[in-house]
Amino acid sequence: MKTSAACMACLTRQAEEAAKQVCDNDAAAEQLLKRVLREAAEFDLSLSPPEMAQLIHRVLRQHSACEDPYAEVKAQSAAMALSLAHRAKSLIVTADDAFEAALRFAIAGNIIDFGALPIAAAEQAPIILEQALAQPIDINMVQQLKAALSQAKRVLILADNVGETFFDKLLIEQLPPHLEVVYAVKASPVINDATVADTVDAGIAALAKVIDTGCDAPGTPLAQCSVSFKHYFDSAEVVIAKGMANYETLHDAEREIYFLTQIKCAVLAQHSPFAQGDWVIASNRSISSAISA
Amino acid sequence: MKTSAACMACLTRQAEEAAKQVCDNDAAAEQLLKRVLREAAEFDLSLSPPEMAQLIHRVLRQHSACEDPYAEVKAQSAAMALSLAHRAKSLIVTADDAFEAALRFAIAGNIIDFGALPIAAAEQAPIILEQALAQPIDINMVQQLKAALSQAKRVLILADNVGETFFDKLLIEQLPPHLEVVYAVKASPVINDATVADTVDAGIAALAKVIDTGCDAPGTPLAQCSVSFKHYFDSAEVVIAKGMANYETLHDAEREIYFLTQIKCAVLAQHSPFAQGDWVIASNRSISSAISA
């Protein structure tokens, strides 16, 4: 999926938020933003939106000499997610279908996304979480994923954002015990995407092998990923990809991938069979059949 | 009020929407948007947001060779407003205080704003209009404006957007009959701001003398306005300014001005005593006292 002209407003908003995080004063933030805009105006829109974000956030980090502009807001998200995940876990373990409930919370956690949404939108997380068990999702796909996991030896989960990781952990706890779980994060900070360091607080390492994609792009642009990552990507019987950036970079991948995401923007809604606001559990194969049907 | 870094995302969204209006295909719209971004990155952020928008929309019109990118959506807004104003009028004439009711609808109409809000937000207009009579507004200021109008010979109304004009007409109908009403629009098209041609459909000319500001900026940057406009601005006993751009360009004017607007963005909320979502009836003098109190 290529970047749309409509993505530029969202990328500009991200750049402004990031600039504010790293600059002491408004004038410095404005200068940094102008620098980013100047470079962004030259970028190739045939790149996917996550690859465009990758370039923009590289410019920001380079000119601000700050390796992780979102460090503070990521820490806040993690603290909030920790307390919300506690409540989610109690609802999962008492649910009729704990796996389905955990899947729902894994999609709910995708609201903590400073790429598609403003930082302030994370305040909505407690409300979104409360809706998790009632939100319409594709129950047939839940069963299909459950069946695929029961037959698999290894599942690769492509992580998304800090905070969301705490809900991914709840999903991992509900996976069949025989499964080897590999959890892939980003190789270095970009927006509020999780890195290896960010998985420690969420307690993922106790339940899964944590690897990284080998690159600093949001999502998973395969051409940029490491050989080691691709080994897991190719060999896992099931791949679960969290969030919009993974959908945008992998929807046309050759192998089957199960996507868990909220559709948080109009551009993606236009380029997918989903509507803005939808909670998605779908595989690229089921989507292809839906489109060609 | 100067442009904030946070305004750039909004201005980029405006530019993308305008580019889509004037281009036949996505590739052309992307090229036009990149051109605008390239120029916008060099602009002086000490300008007010409406003056920044003025420059951006000039670049857009120049490179697209389209004098009025919003012509089609303006026509759609006018058609929608015409039918909604019919309903509003019936509520105004049966209200206990018709002047207050008309003021409320004049503020409600301010939702049709393709500067602060996406074009699609205009779909909310019917819902917003239904809330007009119940929305909290400053009733003391309503009485203060009413008293000022009863003692004035001439009122100057600074118009804002096409569509909103239909509700301004309903307000003009409720002004004291002795008042000379002057209605100032933009000298040429910018975003969906009203020009002289746009007042014809709304039937303003039958009730008021229609003039223009002398410039193509949203709002009323006095340094750019014509001598003829300034004559009316200085000589009218009461000036009513509609919309955010007029607030942003005139809040520090020397003479008293009554503002009628919705606070549609976080940046203005931060630079004013109002909260995002507020419906405002306030004068710059009442605001100064509130701030210094």
Image (spheres, coloured by chain):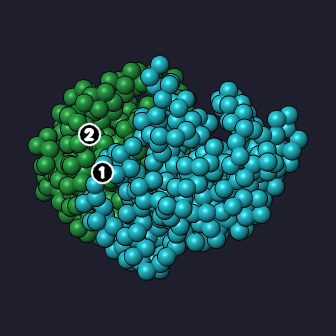
Chain colours: A green, B cyan
Q: Can see residue A57?
A: yes
| Residue A248 sits in quarter | bottom left
> Looking at the picture, how far across and down is residue A99, in whole percent?
46, 35
> Looking at the picture, how far across and down is residue B263, in whole percent?
54, 40
Q: Residue at x 21, y 29 (%)?
A: A200
Task: Name the chain letter of the residue that bears numbered label 2.
Answer: A
Task: Name the chain letter of the residue that bears numbered label 1.
Answer: B
Q: Secondary structure at mark 1?
A: loop
> Looking at the picture, how far across and down is residue B291, in whole percent?
46, 25
Residue A273 or residue B3, whichever sits in front: B3
Q: Residue lying at the far top in this picture: please name it.
A: B293
Question: Mark 2 sits on what residue?
Answer: A26
- On residue B32, the disc is none
Q: Residue at x 36, y 73 (%)?
A: B32
Q: Secondary structure at mark 2?
A: helix
Question: Mark 1 sits on what residue?
Answer: B45
Cα distance, mark 2 to mark 1?
Answer: 11 Å
Amino acid type of the residue tagged 1 in the rendering: Leu
Q: Residue at x 72, y 52 (%)?
A: B180
Residue B164 or residue A250, whichever sits in front: B164
Q: Can see residue A154?
A: no
Is disc 1 surrounded by few (<14), some (14 to 19) or many (20+) residues within 10 Å?
many
